[in-house]
Image (cartoon, rainbow, N blue to C red):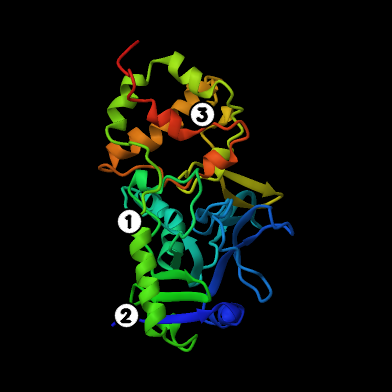
Amino acid sequence: MAVKIFIAADRLDSVLEKLSTKIDLWIPALLKDDKSGPTGFVQYTPGITPAFDRQTTMPLKKLLLPQEETLLRFKYQKDPEGSLKTTIALDDPKEARPTLVFGARSCDVRALVTLDRVFANGPYVDPYYVQRRKNTLFATLVCGQTDSKCFCSSVGGGPADMEGSHLRIVRLEDGYLVEALSKDAQPLLADLAEAPDKSRDQLAAKLVKEASKRQVGDLDTKDCAPAFRNRFQQNDYWASMVSQCLSCGVCTYVCPTCYCFSITDETRNLEGERLRSWDSCMFYHYTLEASGHNPRPTKLERYRNRVGHKFSYIPERYEGLLGCCGCGRCIRSCPVNIDIRQVVGNLKENSNEQ
């Protein structure tokens, strides 16, 4: 039997506070004291107001793949009997704590399927990502509102897609109906609120059904991989698509499926730490080699690689999986209004013409 609770709107804060005593709780919220400002996922503390009314500016991925993280700390220790002899002491970071993300969107959670294939499903496994992944649960909102930039249905998702989610949240006029979708999530709902009455349960089921049928976006992504290959050397096409690009990289930073990173060792005297930080294929220095050669010296080549990675390279390597979740963040955040849907949609138009 499904475990469900109803949280009245005026009791949401108290329920979240109680939930935060059971598990580390993250929610979407304003990042600045500005109602129209950027939003992101923050760790819940009493007094923080959730921002459930719109998609977050920054993606969910930072919880599993932080923008900057310490992989290890090291310390050189000199041998007192020989000044030229040293040993290195290593200190691994602390283990990941059990975490719940309350108020995620289906596109954000679906994006983790792409990250899982890269970091968790081999051939090389990232222990830092895997540990956080195993310790994190997701309570996902059924999207009642989408905007003109969303196109999740075009890439296999949808407003009610619960792939990878552990709880489903349906927003009603007077509160929220929360349903456990996995056994791991059921204990979290204990003693939080009462079970919903029949009318609320039926209304929630109706809203889920309606959301499941709603088509968000009409981008045709079928056969993108061969179309991209045909377009690969058509520089005039790519130049027309990205002539105004600034190579600022914001599209990659707000993208839930982009995972490029760099690793640096930062030292001071005999101590230091190894850091992993987000990087971007849109940056000139990303592919700059020590010799001075850069295989992608222009923004045309860098943006072509970005599109190819999401709609050709990943689908070919991972059996049809797209490297895009249709969240539309790259479109909303681009300072010069480049629309990836236009670039991808035009791939198949006269793609064989040189």
Does residue 58 appear in the picture of this structure? yes
* Residue 20 visible here: no
Q: Give the CA distance from mark 1 to mark 2.
A: 22 Å
Q: Residue furthest right?
A: 33
Nearer mark to the viewer, of 1 and 3:
1
User: Which quarter of the rendered picture does the N terminus lie within?
Assistant: bottom left
The alpha-carbon separation of the residues under discs 3 and 2 comes to 50 Å
Question: Which one is nearer the viewer's eye here, 346 or 180?
Answer: 346
The residue that appears at 44% across and 86% down in the rendered structure is 190
Q: Earlier in the sequence, mark 3 or mark 2?
A: 2
Residue 23 against residue 269 in the figure, above or below: below
Q: In this figure, what is the number of numbered marks?
A: 3
Separation of disc 1 and disc 3 at Cα?
43 Å
Q: What kind of residue is marked 2?
A: Ala
**Residue with the mark numbered 3:** 287
Residue placed under numbered mark 1 in the picture:
213
